[in-house]
């Protein structure tokens, strides 16, 4: 997702594959009532999708991803966001 409002119990985060990637690290943040984003959870996966179950309703979430290639983590992607209703 990027920019939408979601209400399903499960959210599938997806991203483009990186050639030669051994794994991906995803970082998720959620917004506090003041609007500041704080770290929420992170995942390591070999797939280009991750099913996630947001716990806090009426909250803005964002995520980014980076790939490990040849033993080194690459740069973080830009943030993608969604509002969980």
Image (cartoon, grey):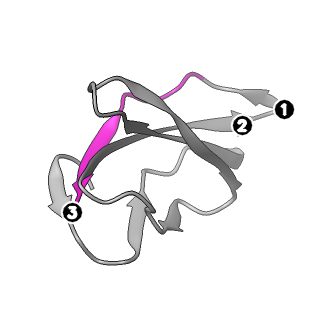
Residue 71: image tag: 1
**In the image, is 77 to the left or to the right of 85?**
right
Q: Is residue 68 magenta?
A: no
Q: Could you tell me how far apart the alpha carbons at marks 2 and 3 are, in whole angstroms? A: 33 Å
Residue 85: image tag: 3
Q: Residue furthest front?
A: 33
Q: Residues within 10 Å of mark 2 (few under 14, many from 20)?
A: some
Kindly identify the residue that appears in the image at 63 percent across and 25 percent down: 74
Residue tagged 2: 68
Q: Residue furthest left?
A: 4
Q: Could you tell me how far apart the alpha carbons at marks 3 and 1 are, in whole angstroms? A: 38 Å
Q: Position of residue 34 (x, y in %)?
A: 27, 25
Q: Nearer the viewer, residue 68 or 54?
A: 54
Magenta segment, which residues?
75-84
Kindly identify the residue that appears in the image at 50 percent across and 64 percent down: 49
Q: Position of residue 78 (x, y in %)?
A: 37, 28
* Element type at mark 3: loop
Residue 46: image tag: none
Q: Nearer the viewer, residue 72 or 43?
A: 43
* Element type at mark 2: strand
Instruction: Check the picture and name the quadrant holding the N terminus.
Output: bottom left
């Amino acid at each position: 997702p990027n920019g939408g409002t979601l209400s399903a119990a499960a959210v599938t985060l997806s991203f483009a594959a990186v050639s030669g990637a051994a794994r991906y690290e995803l970082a998720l943040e959620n917004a506090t009532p003041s609007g500041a984003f704080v770290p929420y959870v992170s995942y390591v996966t070999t797939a280009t999708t991750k099913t996630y179950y947001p716990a806090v309703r009426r909250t803005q979430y964002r995520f980014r991803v980076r790939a490990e290639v040849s033993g080194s983590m690459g740069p973080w992607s830009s943030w993608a966001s969604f509002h969980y209703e």
